[in-house]
Image (cartoon, rainbow, N blue to C red):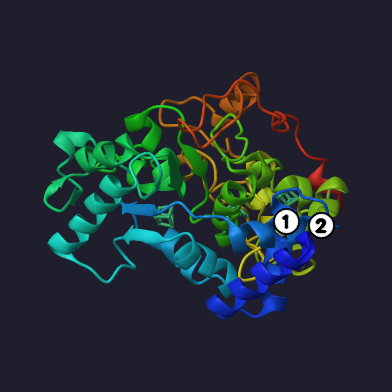
Amino acid sequence: MSGEEKIESALREFLERKRINRRDFLKGCGILAMVLGLSQVDGAAKVALALATKPRPPVIWLSLQDCTGCTESLTRSQSPQLLNLILSDLSLDYHETLQAAAGAGAEESRLATMRDYAGKYVLVVEGSPTPQDGGVYCALGGRSNIDVLKETAASAAAVVAVGNCACFGGIPGARQSPSGGVGVRDILGSGVVHIAGCPPIAEAITATFAHLLVFDRLPELDGLGRPLETYRNTIHDRCVRRTFYDSGQYAKNFDDQGAKQGYCLYLLGCKGPTTYNACPTLRWNGGVSYPIQSGHPCLGCSEPHFWDGGGFYAGQSAPLASPSGVITAVAIAAGAALGAGAILTGRAKNHTTSSHAAPPTSDPPNPEEKTP
Ligand code: SF4
Ligand code: SF4
Ligand code: F3S
């Protein structure tokens, strides 16, 4: 049997075993190949081969202070074959929301995975840790979330924070939150991969695991720990309303003529110019749309402290002011001096460079003249 025949045979066997439609599978692989920046010619085939033949690391998925929206994003994915990669092929061994086991059985499942796959499993964290008051605001199996998080991370091959809560504290970390949520890095230190968003796009989560399978390492990260392949560009860079921004045409109200004609939402509070995410390219619900396309400004949900930044609908507000008063956009620009490079073995490394450009600092073209 030639090399090509062996590959084809392995792929056929995989699709039959998983009962996945070949066309759907290759379409999903094409999407992942696009996110991973692989060549259009053989990228999908490369991804398909990796998914069909490579062994998967087990996954432990901890839910801390969360609303389960990140899991919902994943399970409501319109691409069942991609979802299958996560739930089945990635061998999800422990997920508090999805697993059948409960109580002591669930804890035993987590401990068994840690014991049997020490140094090989991936720890995914959804929701923010809460160290406040000894960690009493979130308990797992009767234990402080901080204890369980540290224990589970200790022998993980990689730690991936999914969603703004886990990455940066999110809503549980907003001002006046009694539980004082923080990011996973605040507990475990650097080296945690951030799949940011509230929630993240399902394909952004899936692509990170696909990268792991295809390249045997985690993706390169930006200065805030996000995979560059998904978070390289701002929403503004590829926005469907960008031509209106560039020509100074803005909606001033949600029901004015500008809004009806799809004008730029900058004056209605859009944080697209300072928000790094792939919404305009990947879009939501199987590529149907994203907030701005549907008429709503970007809230900056993949950036730190988005909940407290300026005002959701305040035009030209300071977009991402952190609780300490430091404008996060400045931190992003400063992050250009930091760096990227993450490998599975020994966890993701600290960053030393970032390809992110500083966010725009000038005002947009004069809105007054051309806004209806
Ligand atoms: Fe929910 Fe958003 Fe937090 Fe995910 S990041 S758990 S969707 S609040
Ligand atoms: Fe799109 Fe917002 Fe930029 Fe306008 S300001 S072009 S709506 S991202
Ligand atoms: Fe979030 Fe903005 Fe996308 S609010 S979903 S990053 S358009």
Q: Judge whether 229 appears above or below 84 on screen.
A: above
Residue 46's disc is 1
Residue on which disc 2 sits: 42
The residue drawn where x is 66% and y is 27% is 354
Q: Given contact means CB atoms under 8 Å apart, are the residues at marks 1 and 2 in contact? A: yes
Residue 321's disc is none
Q: In the figure, is residue 294 to the left or right of 40?
A: left
The residue drawn where x is 54% and y is 36% is 320
- Give percent across and percent down for residue 371: 81, 54
**Camera-side residue: 13 or 324?**
13
The residue drawn where x is 68% and y is 49% is 267
Q: How many marks?
A: 2
Secondary element under disc 1, as helix, strand or loop, is helix
Is residue 335 among the parts visible in the rendering?
A: yes
**Camera-side residue: 200 or 172?**
200
* Callout 1 amino acid: Lys
Is residue 255 among the parts visible in the rendering?
A: no
* Callout 2 amino acid: Asp
Crowding at dot 1, Cα within 10 Å, few <14 / some 14-19 / many 20+, comes out as: some
Assign ligand 1 to one image quadrant: bottom left
Q: Judge whether 140 appears above or below 323 on screen.
A: below
Q: In the figure, is residue 338 to the left or right of 345?
A: right
Q: Judge whether 100 appears above or below 147 on screen.
A: below
Secondary element under disc 2, as helix, strand or loop, is loop
Crowding at dot 2, Cα within 10 Å, few <14 / some 14-19 / many 20+, comes out as: few
- Give percent across and percent down for residue 340: 61, 28
**Camera-side residue: 368 or 3?**
3
- Give percent across and percent down for residue 268: 64, 52
Position of the N terminus by quadrant:
bottom right
Q: Quadrant of residue 98?
A: bottom left
